[in-house]
Image (tube, rainbow, N blue to C red):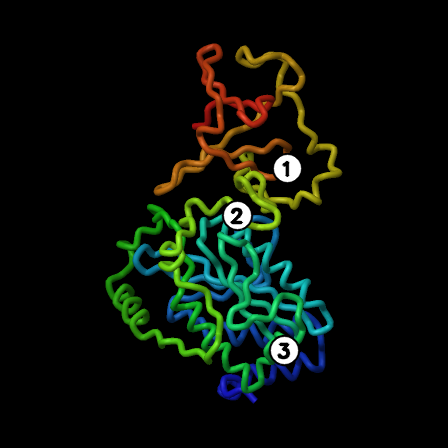
Amino acid sequence: MSRFVSSYPVIRALLLRHRQHNLEYAAVAPFQTALNTLFQARDGYAVNIEQSVDKGRARVDLLIQGLDYDHFTLYMMMVGEMKPSYKSPEEGETQVLKRAREAIVGHGLERIYAFTTLGEGFRFWTVSARTMTLEPLGSDTPRGSHTAYIPLDSAEGDCIVEFSNYVKQNRPLREAPVLPSQDFSAAPEDFRGQASQANHQEEAASFMPNQNFPVSPQEYYDQGYPPPESSVQYETNNPVTSFADSQLQYDANPEDPQGQSMEIDDVLDDPEDEPTAGPSYVAGVSQEPNYIQVTITREVHTIRSDKYLFRKRKRGRLIITNNEDWEKKKVDGKEVWYFKEDSKYWGYKPR
């Protein structure tokens, strides 16, 4: 039996309920309660279910975020997928990897942690921007193994505490601009004092021998790996050469910022998504039907260079580009941009 679970009888009661009802809702509850216990709101952590990692339609079972007390902003720590025991390990692992990749690209993370469960067992993982693959935390066992899942209510299950401490002490790094609306100076003095005290009271993590934890963020730089800003090119079996080529989907519609995203599979057969030619004559642009006008939206960044977004299809994936990806021309006194990779896509200079 787990000393951790014994300290919180409600978790054991939820595990017993799962044994009676081997369904997803029952499998999620013990771990949601356990992680809420380990990542407490009073210490600056938020454990939420059914969340989006990139403001899109796709949801992850569980998302853990932390509060950056210096800037009063939230940062992503861990994504989780939880499945009942009759499911395949690969199902949850594939889903959590996709959400982790979306979080890394969408938020410019150097890495993120992942958490999967199968019935009453769990595993921790890391996903780095360098590899974009699931790397077991504390184990050499590869993906897809039933036996690698550690039963929560077992002596070995107490390692969930050590894993959680490791995640808290080695937070994912990113380039996080401070939003004017989230200026930390607006936080009360007594709140900032409590925040500082909470940080200093964090317990040090201790681990069993021979656990293979990832190198520290500083070691990534010492070993010559690319910094987070250049991590958009991944060394994987399916190389990603740019944000535009990645498998990730975004929900931001340039014409409807409040709109929701759709996965590519949802729109492939939708006739409304086929590109349509621009007007027969717009500001001197060629009348040839293969020219397509798009709406270019500027995404302002504080530290990194600004990004320029557009969609080739009405509800297709969002293409993320840089300023140098566009050829600019003056047409009838207006600046028109042509996408260098495929010049049939054009639009007016974004505001």
* Residue 126: percent from left, percent from top: 51, 63
Q: Secondary structure at mark 1?
A: loop
* Residue 204: percent from left, percent from top: 36, 76
Q: Please name whichever residue, 155 or 351, is drawn nearer the observer in this view of the structure.
A: 155
Judge the density around disc 2: few (<14), some (14-19), many (≥20) Cα neighbours within 10 Å. Answer: some
Judge the density around disc 1: few (<14), some (14-19), many (≥20) Cα neighbours within 10 Å. Answer: many
Judge the density around disc 3: few (<14), some (14-19), many (≥20) Cα neighbours within 10 Å. Answer: many
Q: Earlier in the sequence, mark 3 or mark 1?
A: 3
Q: What residue is shown with label 1? A: 315
* Residue 167: percent from left, percent from top: 44, 68
Amino acid type, callout 3: Glu
* Residue 233: percent from left, percent from top: 51, 44
Q: Please name whichever residue, 113 or 272, is drawn nearer the observer in this view of the structure.
A: 113
Q: What residue is shown with label 3? A: 120
Can residue 249 be seen here? The reply is no
Q: What residue is shown with label 2? A: 234
Q: Please name whichever residue, 37 or 169, is drawn nearer the observer in this view of the structure.
A: 169
Residue 77 vs residue 267: left or right?
left
Q: Please name whichever residue, 183 or 293, is drawn nearer the observer in this view of the structure.
A: 293
Amino acid type, callout 2: Tyr
Mark 3 and mark 1: Cα distance apart in space: 39 Å
Amino acid type, callout 1: Arg
The residue depicted at 34 percent of the width and 49 percent of the height is 178
Q: Secondary structure at mark 3?
A: loop
Q: What's the mark number on residue 166? A: none
